[in-house]
Amino acid sequence: MASILAEFLKVVFLGIVEGITEWLPISSTGHMLLVDQFLQINASESFKEMFFVIIQLGAIFAVVILFWNKMFPFQWSDKNRPFLIKETFLIWIKVVIACVPGAIVTILFDDYIDARFQTPGVIAAALIFYGAAFILIENWNKKRIPAVTKIADINYRTAFIIGLFQVLSIIPGTSRSGATIIGALLVGISRTTAAEFTFFMAVPVMFGLSAIKILKFGLSFTGEELFILVSGMAVAFAVSLLVIKLLMSYIKKHDFKVFGWYRIILGILVFLYFSVR
């Protein structure tokens, strides 16, 4: 009984970490892999590799619920008949365009990255590099007025450029949301719009990655494995509901530099810890 409780508490902690870090530009995968160095769940390596991706679906369901009115491309008329919202439909077309580069790179190089780059050194380097990038970009942006302040005003070319930046997130420690936001800020998109576009992109990206991981692992879960998956996703979902609201409120008045400094400090600590082990 004690061992079951201990495993459950580990999964709850991992769910909390995922729920906090999925939407902040600080790398959820990097944090999960680092936490796994100290707090390992009792499961096979292949299951954990899949779990660190699937748990993110809990966070994705949270953003779908919070942004349902903006994301769902249909409404019902007075006669209870559905009709297409053109603006929302076009946003999804742009999201698909933005997801194409990442989808291609993930399909081609996912196994290679998993085998060679999921190390503390790589995670620390990515944390520091993109932390510095956030600070430099935000300092540069002080002199600029955002060219795009509504997600519907993002054009197809800009969406594709943002998608190219998201390719960077295949390296652990980069952050999918962080890479997307950096790309969006560089091309003149406001912070809140950059965050919203990140939320839109997260839905197909994470469902796609989850499908790949599940197919690689197989559909034969033990009762304990299924319990770990469901519990982790549920906690990530609940925590994400709060974190998304706090993030959107924060960036209306503040920039992303605090996350840049956090990344740099954490990256340095990771380097120091694993260099003296």
Image (tube, helix red, strand yellow):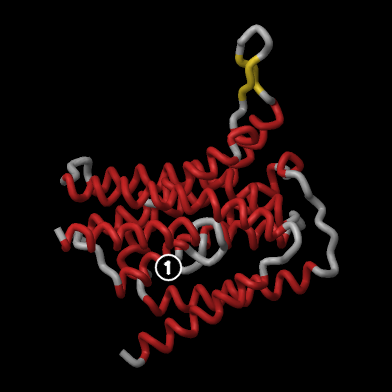
| Direction from residue 28 to residue 73 in the image, left or right | right
Reply above or below: 195 against 13: above
* Res. 100 visible in picture: no
* Residue at the front extreme of this rendering: 1
Which residue is nearer to you in this view: 163 or 39?
39
Residue sitting at 42 percent across and 46 percent down?
Answer: 57
Task: In this rendered view, identify the residue nearer to me: 10 or 94.
Answer: 10
Q: Residue at x 63, y 53 (%)?
A: 162
Residue 161: percent from the left, percent from the top?
A: 65, 53
Furthest toward the top, the residue is 79
Inspect the image, locate mark 1, and give the three-letter code of the amino acid beneath it.
His
Q: Is residue 79 something that shows in the picture? A: yes
Residue at 76% from the left image edge and 74% from the top image edge? 139
The answer to whether 102 appears left or right of 55 in the picture is: right
| Badge 1 element | helix
Reading the image, the residue beneath label 1 is 31
